[in-house]
Amino acid sequence: MLPKFVGQPGQACADSDTRLFFLESTERAAKAICNTAPCRWRAECLQFVLQMTADRDRYGVWGGTTPEERRLLRRERATRRFARDAAQVARGAAQCVELWNQGWLIGDIAHHLGISYAEVYEAIDQAGVTYAMVTERNEQAQRNTDQAPTAQPQ
Ligand code: SF4
């Protein structure tokens, strides 16, 4: 399927020889067309090629970039995504510990944050909470429930 910008007004390479964009020896000239014309579709063009898997995207100047530049771009994006995910996990773990310190039960924390019991346990375990402490809190909660007065019929 052709990208949507092919044949559209403002596509700087429309009148160029396509081979220019697919030969290593003419990469600079192709990039100049993308970047100095400048092409109105540059962002879409780059986005289009970056949506391909890295092993499919091995040829051609697209959106003003060479395959090597796109390889680096993908790596940078993956690194940023990984850092963002790691930050999210760290924030989630901090919330678990905070709720635990406020006296919450593991099950309630898991339900509140929409994560598994194991994930909560792992987070609070890192903060020094032991299995015995978890059991003690669960048992205490059970005792409180057992002792709670039940409504009597009038
Ligand atoms: S960015 Fe370059 S390759 Fe893409 S449409 Fe524009 S001129 Fe053509």
Image (tube, grey):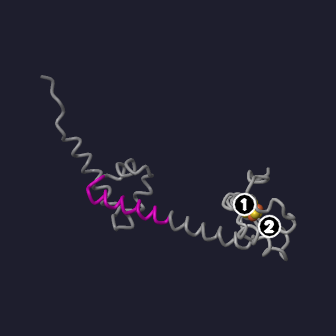
Q: Which secondary structure dominates the residues rendered in magenta?
A: helix
Whether residue 56 can be seen here: no
Magenta stretch encompasses residue 63: no
* Location of residue 137 with respect to 127 vertically, above or below: above
Q: Farthest residue toward the left? A: 154
Q: Does label 1 point to a residue whose CB lies under 8 Å from ligand 1?
A: no
Measure how far apart labels 1 and 2 are at the Cα level. 10 Å
**Tally of marks:** 2
The stretch in magenta equals 86-104
Would you say 42 lies left or right of 99 here? right
Looking at the picture, which amino acid does disc 1 mark?
Answer: Val
Of residues 134 and 76, the one nearer the viewer is: 76
Of residues 69 and 11, the one nearer the viewer is: 11
Q: Residue at x 32, y 57 (%)?
A: 134
Looking at the picture, which amino acid does disc 2 mark?
Answer: Gly
| Mark 1, secondary structure of its residue | helix
The residue identified by callout 1 is 49
Whether residue 113 can be seen here: yes
- What label does residue 60 carry, if any? 2
